[in-house]
Image (cartoon, helix red, strand yellow):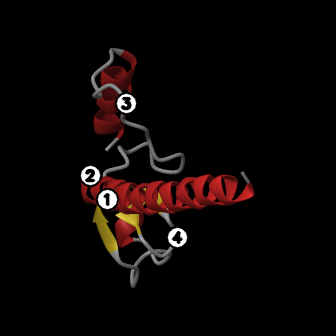
Amino acid sequence: ANIAEIARQLRLRAGGRAAGEDLCRQHREVLKLFCKEDQQPICLVCDKSQAHRFHTVIPVEEAAQEYKEEIQARLQALKEEREKYLESRKTRARKNL
């Protein structure tokens, strides 16, 4: 176990992990999962812990896609609301002339 930990530390120092991958503060493992209840990324060790045992956990890429779709849907709704507002403003401006 000690040798594996030393090897992992050397790999991390040498840039062995992919760019943009964050590590769990507690376990120093890559955050590959997303806990929906806690709304945060977690590592594989955290997933097996008591803290997340009964939580809904999905791959971090899947969570990112879900949030991306949700953001795009909300953005579209806001754009439509803005268009309606601008149109009503134009209508009021015409009536005031």
The one nearer the camera, 95 or 60, is 95
Q: CA distance from mark 2 to mark 1?
A: 12 Å
Circle 3: residue type:
Gly
Tag 4 secondary structure: loop
Local crowd size for mark 1, using a 10 Å CA cut-off: few (<14), some (14–19), many (≥20): few
Tag 1 secondary structure: helix
Identify the residue position indicated by label 1 in the image: 69
Work out whether mark 2 precedes mark 1 in sequence or the reverse, and give the earlier one.
Answer: 2
Q: CA distance from mark 4 to mark 1?
A: 20 Å
Q: CA distance from mark 3 to mark 4?
A: 21 Å
Circle 4: residue type:
Asp
Work out whether mark 3 precedes mark 2 in sequence or the reverse, and give the earlier one.
Answer: 3
Q: What residue occupies the far bottom of the structure in this picture?
A: 54
Q: What residue occupies the far front of the structure in this picture?
A: 97
Q: Are marks 4 and 1 in contact (CB under 8 Å)?
A: no
User: In the drawing, what numbered circle is on residue 38?
Assistant: 4
Local crowd size for mark 3, using a 10 Å CA cut-off: few (<14), some (14–19), many (≥20): few
Q: CA distance from mark 2 to mark 4?
A: 16 Å
Q: Is residue 46 above or below residue 27?
A: below
Camera-near label (4 vs 1) is 1
